[in-house]
Image: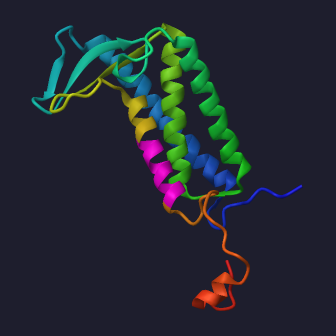
Amino acid sequence: MKEQKAHKKGLKTTAAVAIFAVVAAVVLVLDRATKAWAIASIPQEGLDFIPGLIGFRLVFNRGASFGMLQGATVVFLVISVVICVALLVYLVRYKRHLAFEAAALGLVFAGALGNAYDRLAYGQVTDFLNLEFMSFPIFNVADCGITVGVVLLVIFMVFSKNSPFAAEKPAGAHAAEGGGARGE
């Protein structure tokens, strides 16, 4: 059986798991705390934080972004669980991760888990961040974690030599490129 390709450079799994866990915990705590604050503090008419730029408008979303798939709570719960399990499997399957990559995985995991918690506990997701300078759905900290984490993961997967999707060079290619006898 062929061995799984490990990252060439990076942190050991325990260090990567630690970074992942700290990032995920911080984002989850921020998500829960800001949602609790929003429910307790935002009046029906909303609050302007920086007028014309960002404000707080409390909405409860039973679907996805832009109001799509309203009432599909079970579907989103299943998707969230699958994403969280896949991220954990990826984290332990590969033996080395970059800190950047582990942090990005933690962001996505926390975002998926934060919104899944809302759907499971309340049947809806609490959203409250409103970009007033553009037409954009109202969102929350978990959504930010997912978005930033996915963007960072795409950057990692496309541009990093340590990506599990990076093309492997044939044996001796490094030396032929002037890399000397020390191969990677």
Q: Quadrant of the C terminus?
A: bottom right
Which quadrant holds residue 39?
top left
Point 58% across, 25% down: residue: 79
**Main SS category, magenta section:** helix
Vertical arrangement, residue 178 with respect to residue 10, above or below? below
Q: Where in the figure is residue 47, as x and y percent of width and height?
A: 17, 19
Which of the 4 image quarters holds residue 33? top left
Which residue is at the far right?
1
Residue lying at 54% horizontally and 55% vertically, measured from the top left: 157
Position in image of residue 140 (x %, y %)? 36, 26
Q: In the picture shown, does residue 19 fall above or below 135? A: below
Q: Is residue 8 magenta?
A: no
Image position of 45 (left or right of 174)? left
Q: How is the image coloured?
A: rainbow
The image quadrant that residue 38 belongs to is top left
Residue 101 shown left or right of residue 4 in the figure: left
Q: Which of the pair 63/119 is nearer the observer?
A: 63
Say above or below: 25 vs 63. below
**Above or below, 172 relative to 164:** below
Q: How many marks?
A: 0
Front in this rendered view, residue 157 or 126? 157
Measured from the top left, where is residue 1 in percent x and y?
89, 55
Left or right of 7 on screen, residue 36: left
Q: Position of residue 34 (x, y in %)?
A: 35, 24
| Residue at image point 66% right, 46% down | 91
Magenta-drawn segment:
148-158
Q: Residue shown at 64%/91% (left/top)?
A: 180
